[in-house]
Image (cartoon, helix red, strand yellow):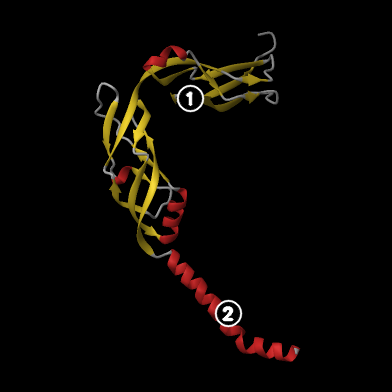
Amino acid sequence: MKGVLDFIFYKFHYKVLAFIFAILLWLLATNKEITEAEIRVSINPIPTGNYEVVDYSPKEIELTVEGYRKDLLILREKGQVNVLLPKELSLKENGKGRVRLKEENILLPVSSAKVKKVNPKYIEVKVEKLIKKVVPVKLEATGIRRNLKLILSPNYVIVYVPEKRKNEVHLVKTEKIDLSSIKGNAEIYLNIVSKFRVEPDRVKLIIRTKQEGR
């Protein structure tokens, strides 16, 4: 019996390997094939000016995209794209406006795909204008040794906040940090924690050791 199996394997194993190799090549060629597809995706509007998006419609659009088959499958699976909105919007008094969807402003999560057509051509948005407010930065730190001098640079930042909520924001805080292991001079960059857009979005914590008797 073993001899029969050895004979069959000897006779056909090259054909089996060739068949498997052919399948792998076919799959590779299929994934690298440039194709075109219509894909329905949800959109995430990204403001580039001093405003925030309150609402928008429609929530989904249909794209005609071209790219590698594997990337189009990834795009279909993810089902969402970012859409860059213009810096300046033409708005009505109620904050509503119409934005044209340009192919180059639709950011796809895959690199090879290219948007060829968008449907619909426009979306309706409702936005709220933001104002600039300068506020101080508060350090959120634990484990501060007595011999350490702490300096935030800068210690004030600009917060972009809706005008009706400007009185709610009096300061911003840094991310939390434990300084118990810091024994000498150091410089650490800390992110600003805020639900609003902040410039700059991080500050430098300068740590200096105080001299005895000073």
Q: Can residue 87 be seen in this view?
A: yes
- Residue for point 51% across, 25% down: 192
Question: Where residue 157 sits in the image (x, y, percent)?
Answer: 45, 19
Foreground: 13 or 98? 98
Q: Please report the residue visible at 37 percent of the width from the left and 58 percent of the height from the top.
A: 67
Q: Neighbour class for label 1 at 10 Å: few (<14), some, many (≥20)?
A: few
Is residue 164 shown above or below 97? Answer: above
Q: In which quarter of the image is residue 99?
A: top left
Tell me the tag on residue 17: 2
Q: What kind of residue is marked 1?
A: Lys
Left or right of residue 201: residue 47: left
Quarter occupied by residue 10: bottom right
Hey, which quadrant is residue 13 in on the image? Answer: bottom right
Residue 125 placed where, x, y %? 32, 32
Measuring from the top left, give residue 79's x and y in whole percent.
Answer: 43, 47
* Residue drawn at x 43%, y 52% as measured from the top left: 76
Which sits earlier in the primary sequence, circle 1 or circle 2?
Answer: 2
Quadrant including the N terminus = bottom right
User: Do callouts 1 and 2 mark residues in contact (Cβ within 8 Å)?
Assistant: no
The answer for how far apart the CA atoms under marks 1 and 2 are is: 58 Å
User: Looking at the image, which residue is at 41% across and 14% down?
Assistant: 166
Helix, strand or loop at label 1? It is: loop
